Amino acid sequence: MTGGRALEVRTLDGRVLVVHDTGVVGDVEGPVLVWHHGSPSTGALLAPVVEAAAVRGVRVLSYARPGYGGSTPAPGRDVASAATDVVQVLDAVGVGRATALGYSGGGPHALACAALLGDRVPAVAVVACLAPFTDDAPWWDGMAAPGGLHAASHGRQARAAYALTETFDPASFVDDDWGTLEGPWGALGQDAQRAEADGPDGQVDDDVAYVSPWGVDLGTVAQPALVVQGGRDRVVPPTHGTALLQHLARGELWHRPRDGHVSALAAVPLAIDWLLQHR
């Protein structure tokens, strides 16, 4: 974790969510951002997010989704369940409203919060975010290593079995992705490795949720919604960004043609600026 504090929030159904919080930044009534982490991740705050937010006077909250970073696993959870968890996190730390910023696997969860929490999420932005599952060629085309998601489409047991022999395919990242991981976003790769060492539960349940009904209609997202998509992304292909835009009534697409899955994170400071303008 980079600065701030870590705390445990006990949910109404008795689970534990591990929450990371930079604390009050500037005015106590100042802006708050919930960072929805990718897959896999411990949920810990990452320096580039914290630093970009701090210079803008923004407080950052992050929580480990069930099965990650000490949060109680919740097999069978859907994407929409993130809204139930986030509202309990916000209540626990005394925050009324917070914008949402989701990266990769965190993107669907950020959008679900916008759809289901109304005014408590005044604006949402996602980077390299999967579109709702359709199991047709456009959804799969361009993924360098779709094995985990293919397994997940056959259920949790199949995805858990796949995890026993799963390895990362370097072809998933373009050169700029590797350069980004060697530079300002090095903490992202390190955090993913820590999450993998903790076991596969979080990743397994994430993947099953992505390729199952999300439990939420993105057409109900009434807030301003920003979609940032890399044109060379081999994990979440560019067609997903276009598909998301078709669901979002007030959606805006930033297509970054040279970016891959990780290098698109260079847009995070700009995305925070956009959220501040729309909160």
Image (cartoon, rainbow, N blue to C red):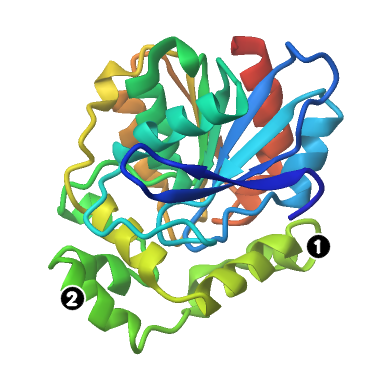
Q: Is residue 125 left or right of residue 240?
A: right
Residue 30: image location, x then y, percent: 74, 14
Residue identified by numbered label 1: 183
Look at discs 1 and 2 and give the one toward the viewer: 2
Residue 42 in which image quadrant: bottom right
Residue 46: image location, x then y, percent: 71, 51
Q: Is residue 115 above or below residue 170?
A: above
Q: Nearer the viewer, residue 157 or 8?
A: 8
Q: Is residue 208 left or right of residue 201?
A: left
Q: Quadrant of the N terminus?
A: bottom right
Residue identified by numbered label 2: 158
At x 40% / y 73%, what residue is drawn?
200
Q: Nearer the viewer, residue 159 or 260?
A: 159
Q: As shown in the figure, which amino acid type bears the numbered disc 1? A: Gly
Q: Which is nearer the N-term, disc 1 or disc 2?
A: 2
Q: As shown in the figure, which amino acid type bears the numbered disc 2? A: Ala
Q: Is residue 111 above or below residue 179?
A: above
Could you tell me which secondary element the residue under label 2 belongs to?
A: helix
